[in-house]
Image: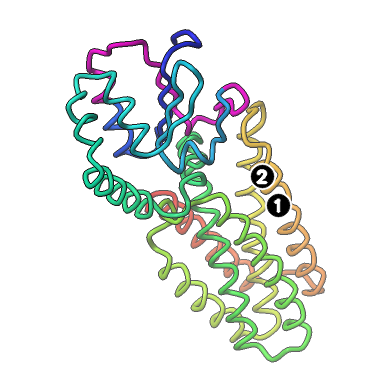
């Protein structure tokens, strides 16, 4: 790993371009000992290195043997001077060259977008969890638009009150998932989920209040199982306590929604209602499968 007097290079291992560049450097002979530190790791020790994870992910940093922290082009120059690239380091001393390099690097940092830390956190998760969260985001997006459709097409006052309350909760869930899943990692079928939610909302509310209650109850049963399975899979894992908290909160809300609609239905499910719930459950399974993949 290297001693404390080694040159420390901080890079974003979740960025394919950054990782590829670092791998080139790592294959070169070095003039001094270099320690390569992946700042995208959830175990990054900010106190040990004297550098915040946010800063280390947002811009290229190094820490010299004497403890000086450099960022951007000066950091690259210092690293190049320790590799068979000292000529490039010397060329960068020319002011106009340094300005061009700085402009190019700032442009690259802007193109990476504002979700650098979120992306690193997301990609540090196991692939299974990444797929689960992608499907969660798609599901909450669909839920928001289902309740919007319900408010548009159902004039029953009780249904509208329930839909308004549920819409507030689902918007909160969607914001939570947006805070966990970066834009680049969300399902690419966004508009498919929105359209499907509106179609489901129209079909459910065409049947009036009972159609709304039967649909919501069936979907919430599926969502309860979906979130519950994810929480079961997290048992024993020590990472992402905030993720466990988000899923627990979402599960509690979805259970409350199901119970509210079951009470509001005030009767036993007819054969037609049960068949409709089977259809919506099958559709939900299919949607989750696709969202996990695409």
Q: Residue furthest top?
A: 3
| Location of residue 79 in the rendering, given as x and y in whole percent from the top left corner | 32, 25
At horizontal 74% and vertical 58% (from top left) the residue drawn is 253
At horizontal 60% and vertical 61% (from top left) the residue drawn is 174
Q: Nearer the viewer, residue 38 or 289?
A: 38
Q: Is the C-beta separation of discs 1 and 2 under 8 Å?
A: yes
Name the disc covering residue 251, or none. 1
Q: Nearer the viewer, residue 270 or 225?
A: 225
**Position of 67 compared to 82: left or right?**
right
| Location of residue 208 in the rendering, given as x and y in whole percent from the top left corner | 66, 86
Q: Quadrant of residue 274?
A: bottom right
At horizontal 64% and vertical 67% (from top left) the residue drawn is 171
Quickly name the residue at label 2: 228
At horizontal 32% and vertical 53% (from top left) the residue drawn is 107
Q: State which region is magenta.
A: 23-48
Q: Compared with residue 173, is residue 215 higher up or lower down, i.e. above or below? A: below
Q: Does 43 appear in magenta?
A: yes
Q: How was the colour assigned to the protein in this rendering?
A: rainbow
Q: Nearer the viewer, residue 276 or 101?
A: 101
């Amino acid at each position: 790993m290297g001693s404390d007097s080694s040159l420390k290079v901080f890079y974003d291992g979740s960025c394919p371009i950054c990782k590829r560049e670092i791998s080139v450097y790592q294959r070169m002979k070095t003039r001094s000992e270099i320690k390569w530190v992946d700042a995208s790791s959830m175990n990054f020790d900010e106190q040990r290195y004297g550098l915040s994870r946010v800063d280390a992910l947002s811009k290229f940093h190094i820490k010299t043997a004497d403890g000086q922290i450099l960022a951007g082009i000066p950091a690259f120059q210092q690293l190049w001077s320790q590799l068979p690239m000292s000529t490039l380091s010397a060329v960068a001393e020319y002011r106009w060259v340094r300005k061009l390099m700085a402009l190019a690097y700032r442009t690259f940092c802007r193109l990476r977008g504002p979700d650098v830390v979120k992306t690193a956190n997301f990609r540090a998760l196991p692939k299974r969890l990444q797929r689960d969260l992608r499907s969660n985001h798609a599901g909450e997006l669909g839920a928001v638009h289902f309740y919007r459709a319900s408010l548009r097409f159902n004039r029953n006052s009780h249904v509208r009150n329930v839909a308004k309350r549920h819409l507030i909760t689902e918007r909160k869930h969607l914001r939570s998932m947006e805070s966990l899943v970066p834009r680049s990692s969300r399902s690419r079928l966004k508009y498919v989920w929105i359209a499907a939610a509106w179609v489901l909302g129209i079909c459910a509310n065409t049947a009036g209040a009972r159609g709304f209650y039967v649909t919501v109850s069936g979907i919430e049963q599926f969502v309860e199982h979906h979130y519950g399975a994810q929480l079961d899979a997290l048992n024993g894992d020590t990472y992402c306590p905030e993720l466990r908290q988000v899923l627990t909160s979402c599960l509690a809300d979805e259970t409350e929604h199901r119970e509210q609609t079951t009470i509001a239905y005030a009767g036993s499910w007819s054969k037609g209602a049960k068949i409709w719930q089977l259809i919506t459950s099958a559709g939900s399974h299919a949607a989750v499968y696709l969202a996990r993949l695409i």
